Structure formats: C-alpha cells, structure tokens
Image (spheres, rainbow, N blue to C red):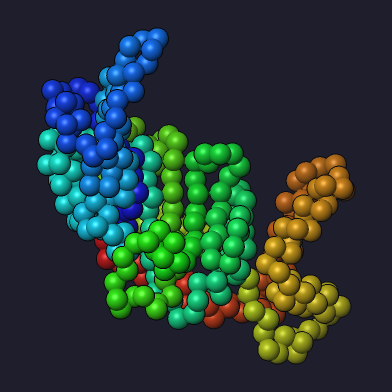
Amino acid sequence: MYDKLRFWIDMAVVGGQAQTIANNLDRAHTHIDCQTGEENVYGSIMGLKVSIYASGVSVVGSLPKFLYGSNIYPLDRHSTADAVAKLSDTLHVDANKANVTSLEFGTTFLMKKPVADYLPKLVSMPRLDRYSFNTSTLYFKGKGRNPSKVFAFYDKAADIKDKGMMCPEDLKQANLLRYEMRINNRLAAQLGLRRLKASTLAEKPFYRQLVKRYQNNYFSIQKLNQMKANAISGIRTVKDAYDVLVARLITESDNNAIKSYIDELKAAGVFDDRKNYTRLKSKLQDVASKADFTVTDDLIKELDNDIKNCGAYV
C-alpha cells in the first residue's frame, strides 16, 4: 500500500558512488552556490527525482511507478522489498540503509457508485480541517503549507486521466476511490521510532502498524448518516421530537452545515470560552448520528467494509 516516498541516503552510505549516480541521471543539471562553491546535482532516474548534495542523496517518487510503471496497484510489503532492491541496483548504493522522511500509504477501492457520491458523506475528522475543492477530491489536514498529516480521498480514474497516465483496460470505466494517508515532518517520531529505514518498510510488524493506523484514522471520521424510514415512530418525548428534526435537517443539508454554522458563531464571537464551539459541534454531530433515529448510509457501509478488508492480508 506504499506509494510516494522520500528517502535520504547519507553520503557515508553513498561513498564513492555519487558521481556514478550523477552520470546515470536523466536531464541532470548542476547548481553551484556562488558564495560557498558547493555543487548540487539534480535530475531523475526511472521517474524518481534525485538530488545529490555534499551531505547525501535525496530520492523522491512513487515506488509503484518505479517498479511497475504505474501506481494504480500499490505496493504491499513484499513488493516494497523488491522495489528497494531495484533502487539499490539502479543507484549502485544499498538503499535499505536510506532514511525514510515522508511516505504516502493507501490503496484504490473499486466502488459501486461514482466517487463523488461517497465524499460528501465524510463530514469531519478530529483536529483536522476539511477541504473539498471539487466533487471528486477531499482532504482532511492541518493548517499551514506543509502539514504533518494529510488524509486524501479522490477519484483515481479522474487523476489518471488528468495526468495522461495509462489505465488498465478493465478499469477504464470503473469507479475508483483512492484513500491515502500522507505523513510528513518528523516521520519517525510520529510513528514512535528513533529512525525509519527503507528496510523497515517491508517488515511485518511495521507494515501491520501502518495498516492499523490507516484504518483507525478512517474510522475516526464523522460520517453522514441516513434517517430511519420510521424515525417518527420512535418519538416518545419532546426531546426526541427535537432530536429527530435536527437530525433530519443535518442529514438532508449540505455536509458542511455543522462546520459552516460553527464558523459563523466563531466569526460573531458568540462564546467567550472557545471550548464551547467544540462542545456544540460534538452535540450536533451526536444528534445527527443518534442510533435511535439514524442508520449508517449504504455507501458508507460499502466503504467501511473495504477499509476493514484491506488489512486482511498482511
């Protein structure tokens, strides 16, 4: 399930192979710092971006594309070991000793309906903001230009078409939903490690940990439920009637209804204690998903099952 990764190979590991790597780069060019005289070489090799510095070599790119020529099918831990071995042969350096400084972990799911039907039902994620720029792309991430964690959901078929990539014939008309977990900045620390080496990626305990993290983050997302057909028959009190109305208004509205309302309250400075905005948001979400009156949406059930099953074989 690995896709794009960023490796750093210390010059102590590269040894005397720096010039060999430079000679094998496509479209290589040299940048000279006029003040220090330091020379850096930039280029690519089999689709991977390679930068050679005095302190080491940076390698960035999609390992599935490097190994297979496409990332429509992501790497499991076994094929990841094959990709790292191929990288070692290509660079003439032991890539297993490279430090992994960022990674994308995810896979593509074959869905019954168009991807745009699923994304509006993914409402909010703890401590992250929701960004939806079009009907086929959704991000949950922190603020800033380079957030440490990003969770992306998007239409993989549309992505392939936009980038002019090849798509297998049997998948050209398929509904392909891609879910990725992207971890940047202090990667090892985020994963509870002192350092993360390329060799670790194929180790079963580590891979299993990533699958679990991938699944747990998905299931932390607040989903948009459906109203039960007989919700009114469950009303016994005035509070029940109030809850049914609120749940109905939320489930039938735009999926950003709660967020928009909270943002409006914040802009007006309604509460002195900012914790009240969080309390209100939780209360509204609880009502909107109250088991007495709502049920899990059928499309969400489908996606839930796919996420659970993706970790069946580790």
Q: Is residue 212 left or right of residue 245?
A: left
Q: How many numbered badges does the structure rendering display?
A: 0
The residue that appears at 55% across and 71% down in the rendered structure is 116
> Which quadrant would the C terminus be assigned to in this image?
bottom left
Please indicate, yes or no, whether residue 138 appears anywhere in the rendered image: yes
The residue that appears at 41% across and 65% down in the rendered structure is 161
Q: Camera-side residue: 75 or 159?
A: 159
The residue that appears at 60% across and 58% down in the rendered structure is 133
Q: Position of residue 201 (x, y in %)?
A: 26, 47
Q: Camera-side residue: 242 or 28?
A: 28
Q: Position of residue 151 (x, y in %)?
A: 49, 54
Please indicate, yes or no, whether residue 199 appears anywhere in the rendered image: no
Q: Is residue 200 left or right of residue 172?
A: left
> Which quadrant would the N terminus be assigned to in this image?
bottom left
Q: Camera-side residue: 307 or 31?
A: 31
Q: Position of residue 298 (x, y in %)?
A: 54, 81
Q: Position of residue 88 (x, y in %)?
A: 15, 40
Residue 238 figure quarter: bottom right
Does residue 215 lie above or below 58 as drawn?
Answer: below
The residue that appears at 15% across and 41% down in the rendered structure is 90
